[in-house]
Image (cartoon, grey):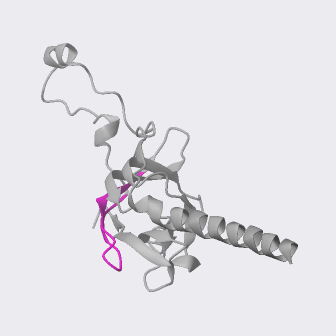
């Protein structure tokens, strides 16, 4: 009889610890924030901007190449809030690095934190889980870069989604548009 009670207490303790761990995993992201501040990948189509002393000595009528921070993106967009009052904001753009790798860049990005958040590229009208997963969200605040697969067609996969796998919820979305539009 005594061993049955001790066995029941052990099982109860294990269940309580499991429930507490799961609760912490689900709820703690609402209170904790992960800030990211990744630098812009070095853009191959840009040249460092001249300093002020050199610029004043040159002819001001000649056009200058913008600094990497001012490089024009091929695609751009803005995040909007997701479903169920999940708040998301920030800018999205593509950047080509020196090694011809295409990046998706989030700037001034901010979203509610949550468990199991991922970045997806999705065709409009399709389910998020059917899109192209770029990886786990690096942080719920700040500038961050994600490598785009070479074969991705951003005219087709034009929707960027911050997706929570645990809740099957879109925390935020953004529509990519070509800069020529």
Residue 68, percent across and down?
Answer: 35, 37
Residue drawn at point x = 33 percent, y = 54 percent: 109
Q: Is residue 120 above or below residue 1?
A: above
Task: Please give the count of numbered marks on the rendered protein.
Answer: 0
Q: Is residue 168 magenta?
A: no
Q: Residue 16 appears at what percent x and percent y?
A: 63, 69
Quarter of the image with the C terminus is bottom left
Q: Say which of 145 and 25 sits in front.
A: 25
Quadrant holding the N terminus? bottom right
Image-based side of 7 in relation to 98, left or right: right
**Whether residue 116 can be seen here:** no
Question: Percent from the top left, x then y, of residue 138?
Answer: 49, 52
The residue depicted at 36 percent of the width and 51 percent of the height is 141
User: Residue at (31%, 63%) from the top-left corner?
Assistant: 77
Q: Which region of the structure is painted magenta?
A: 75-94
Residue farthest along the front direction in this orientation? 1
> Is 140 or 45 nearer to us in this picture?
140
Please name the predominant secondary structure of the magenta segment in the image: strand
- Residue 170: image quadrant is bottom left
Q: Position of residue 46 (x, y in %)?
A: 37, 36
Q: Is residue 1 visible?
A: yes
């Amino acid at each position: 009889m005594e061993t049955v009670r001790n066995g029941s207490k052990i099982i109860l303790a294990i269940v309580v610890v499991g429930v507490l761990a799961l609760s912490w995993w689900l709820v703690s992201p609402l209170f904790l924030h992960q800030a990211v501040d990744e630098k812009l990948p070095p853009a191959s189509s840009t040249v460092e901007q001249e300093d002020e002393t050199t610029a004043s000595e040159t002819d001001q009528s000649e056009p200058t190449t913008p600094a990497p921070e001012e490089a024009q993106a091929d695609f751009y967009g803005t995040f909007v809030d997701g479903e169920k009052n999940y708040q998301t904001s920030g800018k999205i753009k593509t950047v080509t690095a020196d090694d011809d790798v295409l990046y998706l860049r989030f700037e001034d990005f901010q979203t509610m934190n949550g468990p199991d958040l991922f970045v997806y590229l999705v065709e409009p009208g399709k389910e998020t889980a059917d899109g192209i997963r770029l990886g786990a969200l690096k942080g719920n605040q700040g500038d961050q870069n994600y490598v785009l697969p070479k074969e991705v067609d951003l005219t087709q996969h034009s929707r960027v989604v911050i997706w929570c796998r645990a809740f099957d919820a879109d925390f935020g979305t953004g529509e990519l548009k070509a800069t020529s539009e």
